[in-house]
Amino acid sequence: MATGLQQTRGLILKLTISYRFDRFGITPYYKLTSIFYRHNGFVKVFREEYMEQSALGGMKVVEFCSRIGGAYCTKLMADMGAEVIKVEPPAKGDDARRRGPFQGDIPHPEKSGHFLFLNSNKLGITLNPSKPAGSEIFISLIKDADILVEDTPPGMLEKMGLGYETLHEINPGLIMTSITAFGRSGPYKDYKAAHLNISHVSGQGYLLPIPAPDINRPPVMPGGNKGGYDIGITALVAVLAAYYQKGISGKGQLLEISRQEALMGMQRIEAASFRNSNIKLDRSPELHRRRIGGVIACKDGYITLIFPQESQWVSLLKMMGNPEWSREPYCENSAAREEHAEKINEKIAAFMKDYTRREIVELGQSFSIPFSPVNTAKDIVESEQFNEVGFFKTITHPVMGEIKFPTAPYRFSKTPWSAKKAAPLLGEHNVEIYCGRLKYDKEDLIRLRQSDII
Amino acid sequence: MNNGPLHGLRITEFTSAWAGPYATCLLGFLGAEVIKVESQRRIDHSRLIAFTMAKVFSSFNKSSVFDSLNLNKKSVTLNLSKPGAVEIAKKLAAESDVVVENMRPGVMPRLGLGYEVLSEIKKDLIYLSSSACGQIGPDRQFIGYAPNFASIGGLSHDTGYPDWLPSNLMGFIDLKSATTAAYAILMALIHRQKSGEGQYVDLASQETVAILNSDMLLDYIMNDRVKERHGNRDEIMAPHNCYPCQGEDHWISIAVSSDEEWQSVCQAMYKPELAEDERFADMYNRWCNQEIMDEIIGQWTAEQEDYDVMETLQKVGVAAAPSLSSERLCTDPHLQEREAFRLVKHPVIGDNWVVAPPWRLSETPAAINRHSPLLGEHNDDVLNGLLGIPKAEIKKLEAEEVIF
């Protein structure tokens, strides 16, 4: 069981999974972190003194982004305790609110699972900084921020009077992170790029799918919008390193991230393969027919099998009962096997066709061979492993209600992942930030609203 | 000398392959000193083979792949099957801020180098374990490489054509895991900077892939839907595909995000009749009729060079860019001007081109200062210089294959 919330007699207990390290290895245990109760349909905090400390508590971040990369970068900080203020355009809000999946398949700005995932634990305000009163407010937000993450095209913030030089003068400790399609210099700097284009111009798409049935069909991007997340995590490494440095020197700086270079960085071996080794990598079926293993069909779907080490080949044969064919000359050594990979793959497939994914994976792994199932979303959501480690937790959203939610791919022993709040409703924290913090009064707020500034 | 933002931090790593080494390589670009503990007895196999390229290297110091993933590091050879080597590894941990390992769960504790032991020696140590499935759960002993993480994490299933197999994904999968490990370590370092407290981080490579699939996971959670592979298609935008161009296997990717942009595409193609065509009048109609549209656009692009199509369409505000092979990435004028590839001089390999660090920091720049270490290159430097083991003792330990 890894459910985050347990309900007992109308009280909701929030439990956090932690680990104990001892001579027997690692033991998971639950800690009570807070108690909530329901009142008129709302969940209220009863007691929160058990709260764990957070890794990034005290860090202040402003996010002005419309793409996945920037939003994911700041979400990861918010999930670990940073205060993230997300600035959305008034009225229409972030584009992510218009992307599915939507709860119940009903498009609604507060029901997008895509937005929900990208914005957990953030505060949300609406603001249009392209108007003078808006840019003034933006500056007052930046005054005591540690980090700004923005993904506007080069020159746009400068036009609003919000360029790095201005912001740096106002707040020398500011770490301004600028994520653009092609960087802030070079011949393509003003070019537009959707995620599709970045996937291809970074070298990632050209090699997909692997293997392709036919080289004359177009190369494809990785499924979903996953490269967008890769850009976010790449940026985060530099952001956190600069923040660590700020903890020593007190100084801020400008970080520049090109989406093209971020994805090319994740292809660093393939990207340099031609220049270094004259190896022309492509997605051609010929290349992959010469490789043993890969994606192979079994009884209820596909599995992936890879065995780079000789010992794993020997184990594979043992697993299959040392079949007659494995004593043929074409199995003699790895070079011969490479030559006849297609033939060998057929033999392996014939062996596997009567097994389910789980059966063959358990059998293979018991021989220390890296077998794995090709999972769909359903398989992951229902996976015993993913559920047991606490990869999913239940969070509560004011419109969507309780929802099973993917947390993080790691467990910190002392500062665990936690969902303090779901993604913000559009403008949810306007009053808190504008009136509570920036000291505008309620009448100001109305006027700002009427002039489409917030 | 690297004056990056992590200057002054020391990391000791017990990692091999791609995911572990590149995590600390990223931190090394940013100025951290990284000491790699390895041994001929348990060699980092990227020194010998590059599975992605089906390439085998003839000696420990000839791998361009190892070089690219281990830049700026120092190498110490400790044969951890010998108790003397374990003792030296402990001394190294005592001098380190961070320890990173990616052995099979349970191996480090068995060697006497688990978190429990090392955090006794160095109270505020940050210790990250990177493994296929994590340190707990029913599958924790399962082993895996990049293609396994991709298939377990759901990325294989949804990459490719709807009428073809799931994809067998490799290299960049490991580097996702590596980048995740790098920022997780930094989160722990920031916590330590505030509180003085170290901690243990259990990272699961298969989850670093699965988490990026959250849209699909939530679609199943909320709507019981399992998405299938969809090539280059988007859920909203159309046209949204790659189109053939002049040259062998040259393609241009085009993404149209508004009615205005579609009008511009029609003008650029000199096909005003399409701008009036009701089948393509709005995003919904374009999405429903995208196959017809793809064919028309494909006929137009097939006559041209991909870079020319990019320029024509970008001029009228439409997102278009070629699908680049490794051969063409290194001649791309934009990447050249931005110095996205750097030349590393390696004493055995000679010239090795690597991709530059993926960020520009204005005050504390990331840098590549040196080639990857030769096996054991820094034994004297680290064991004598840092740990104070006398040189004669080092010689003796070498003879006993403790240092090996």
Image: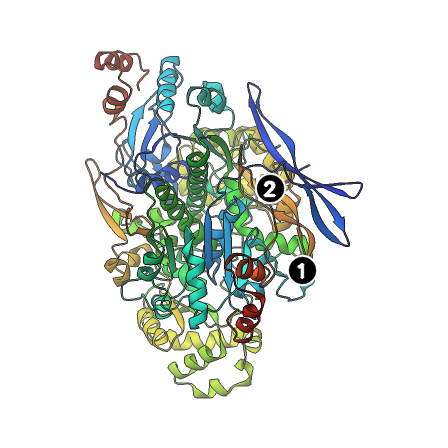
Chain of the residue where label 2 is placed in the rendered structure: A
- Residue B48 at x, y = what percent? 33, 34
Q: Residues within 10 Å of mark 2 (few under 14, many from 20)?
A: many
- Residue B132 at x, y = what percent? 51, 36
SS of the residue under disc 1: helix
Q: Please, is residue A189 above or below residue A31 in the view?
A: below
For the residue marked with disc 1, what is the amino acid? Gln
SS of the residue under disc 2: loop
Tell me how far mark 2 sits from mark 1, CA to CA: 21 Å
- Mark 1 — residue? A103
- Residue A374 at x, y = what percent? 57, 46
Residue B358's disc number: none
Q: Nearer the viewer, residue A73 or A50?
A: A50
**Residue A181 seen in the current view:** yes
Q: Is residue B246 left or right of residue A345?
A: left
- Mark 2 — residue? A391
Q: Residues within 10 Å of mark 1 (few under 14, many from 20)?
A: some
Q: Please, is residue B361 above or below residue B60 in the view?
A: below
**Residue A215 seen in the current view:** no
